[in-house]
Image (tube, coloured by chain):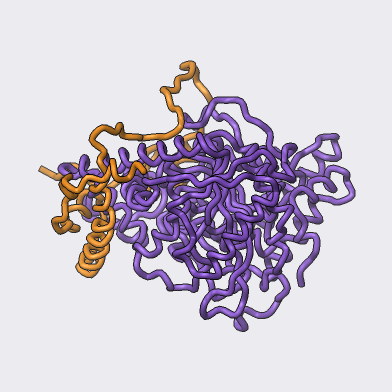
Amino acid sequence: MTTSLRTNRSIPTLSSEKIDVRYVAKLARIALTDDEIERFGAQLGDLLEHVDSLAKLDVSAVAATAQVVESRNVEREDVVRPCLDRETVLEQAPQRQGGFFRVPRIIAES
Amino acid sequence: MSNPLTERSAAAIARDVNARTLSAADVADAVLTHIDDVDPQVGSYLTVLHDRAREVAAQVDARVAAGERLPLAGVPLAVKDNMCLTGTRTTAGSKILERWVAPYTSTAVERLLAAGCVPVGKSNMDEFAMGSSCENSALGVTRNPYDVTRVPGGSSGGSASAVAAYEAAIGMGSDTGGSIREPAAFCNLVGFKPTYGRVSRYGLIAFASSLDQIGPLTRTVEDAALAYDAMAGHDDMDSTSIDRPLEATAGHLRTDLRGVKIGLVKEFATGKLDAEIHALYEQAYRDLEALGAELVEVELPTADYGVATYYLIAPAECSSNLARFDGVRYGLRVDGADVHDMYERTRAAGFGPEVKRRILIGTYALSSGYYDAYYVRAQKARTLIAQDFERAWKACDFIACPAASSPAFQFNAKSDPYSMYLMDYYTIPMSLAGLPALSVPCGWVKPPGGDRPMPMGLQLCAPLFKERELLGAAHAYEQKTKHALTHRPLIADTAAPSGSV
């Protein structure tokens, strides 16, 4: 019924260039082995081929949906409410120092 | 050996505990003993809460003795391990949270406890709920109680196997693209995903926030209704939680479908499935008709794009949500030369392959230059899918279709990631549209290479917020067909050593 109206093969296909897994992994902050880069590269390429089918949908006049059900900005009175105490939260820290989370050096020594 | 107490419905347990002809403590003891007996073979639980269950059961008995009437008094509950319960290990099936102990309780769990449930264990799941077989858990193997060579489905596989093997009466699941409905179908259960926003997600470890929804897995529709009534409703701790009046469902279950129009989806015609499975769904539709429903054909022309749409949107959201696992505040940390090295090593060691794949695809789809081509296009396809349903609702009250295209498959049968993604073909469109949908047992098939009959699920879907009507219709179908009662789980009657399975 409406499929034919929406199908428009003149729409450019999505990017079919090879995914640069090393670069994406850097963005995602995940260290990958060479073996993983090869395997994930092939698998992600395969998935992208499948999702390329979306290029067949004419979405030029369609609004994007971020969330289906009614949503609106939710506000509440700015009053203090009980929350987890600091000690409870810090108990789960991989490393702590006093009342702080301890992390490796962030700023290089000059 | 199995104890009949463990096999009773949540409704029956609550009735007798409220009447004080049965104690929550005795139910908890029976279930815990049964878990100790069968769980080495099934693997439903990552953590069994022996002490906590006995403690809560005693409190339930005291509350009932003091005159409280609790809708789920003494009902043993399996909590999926992506839901927080104060003081219990909550792993999301991941090494990155293997030793994390929840410092608070999720709203949905809290409400079930308030209604009298007794938490007996934290159930296994695909890591961060990404999967359809439970095989992506980094922490344990879960088997299908109807055939231990097969998967229980996923991602809520541990809750499904627990309820199927009588290790709980209610299992909590979370459903992002089918993670309640598919394991329910695989394990001969009712699995119900309410409208997006009906159940608070506060305390649920996020996967894809615009899709995640909590719901119950149970052995009967009535139990699903009782569980839903207890856990649903607005919560100001979840800003996506729907603030509109809640209709109780449990007292409104139907026994016929007179005056109801049920849509059969043209694009979901089952002729392309195995002949035996096709015949089973044809029979299911005839049974709906025999109950008084009028069957009409509806079209969901964009539904075929559901899987492609979902596998851009869900990974995009997960890549953002899982950025919080960085080794700083909680969970695993692997030391590195500097903070970036620490992040990369921590996430490399903490996440399994499926989670890495999804984070990578999501990061790619959101990255500069690809955002419009992938993510925004998928969001627009999502709009079209939701509009398809809107049109369909002009012609029908519910949609009926398969919950999954096959019964539970064997371990390692879906080694190609995309073949696993296709398991959610029938459940994803409803998730993208935010609609309430459930799976109810609809018969048995003997899968190729298997010598045991395996259950199949009929999926019923309703317009937004029509939970009462949906559960009512499912109840009518369940009461007429009683497919769930045809076969018993193999595991329930065996106390053999694990070496024999």
The quarter of the picture where the C terminus of chain B appears is bottom right
The answer to whether residue B82 of the structure is visible from this angle is: yes
Task: Indicate the quadrant where residue B42 lies.
Answer: bottom right
Q: Position of residue B482 (x, y in %)?
A: 72, 58
Q: Position of residue B268 (x, y in %)?
A: 46, 54
Q: Nearer the viewer, residue B382 or A83?
A: B382
The quarter of the picture where the N terminus of chain B appears is bottom right
Query: Which residue is pictured at 86% across the width and 51% down the height?
Result: B22
The answer to whether residue B343 of the structure is visible from this angle is: no
Q: Position of residue B411 (x, y in %)?
A: 47, 73
Q: Nearer the viewer, residue B334 or B66?
A: B66
Query: Which residue is pictured at 34% across the width and 41% down the height?
Result: A2
**Residue found at the very far left of the displayed protein:** A110
Task: Indicate the quadrant where residue B66 lies.
Answer: top right
Q: Nearer the viewer, residue B373 or B366?
A: B373
* Count of numbered circles on the image: 0
Query: Which residue is pictured at 46% across the width and 40% down the height?
Result: A89
- Rendered position, B410 above or below B26: below
Is residue B145 rendered to the left or right of residue B154? Answer: right
User: Chain B is which colour?
Assistant: purple
Query: Which residue is pictured at 34% across the width and 51% down the height?
Result: B311
Is residue B392 rendered to the left or right of residue B365? Answer: right
Q: Position of residue B57 (x, y in %)?
A: 75, 49
Is residue B223 rendered to the left or right of residue A13? Answer: right
- Rendered position, B1 above or below B461: below
Chain represented in orange: A
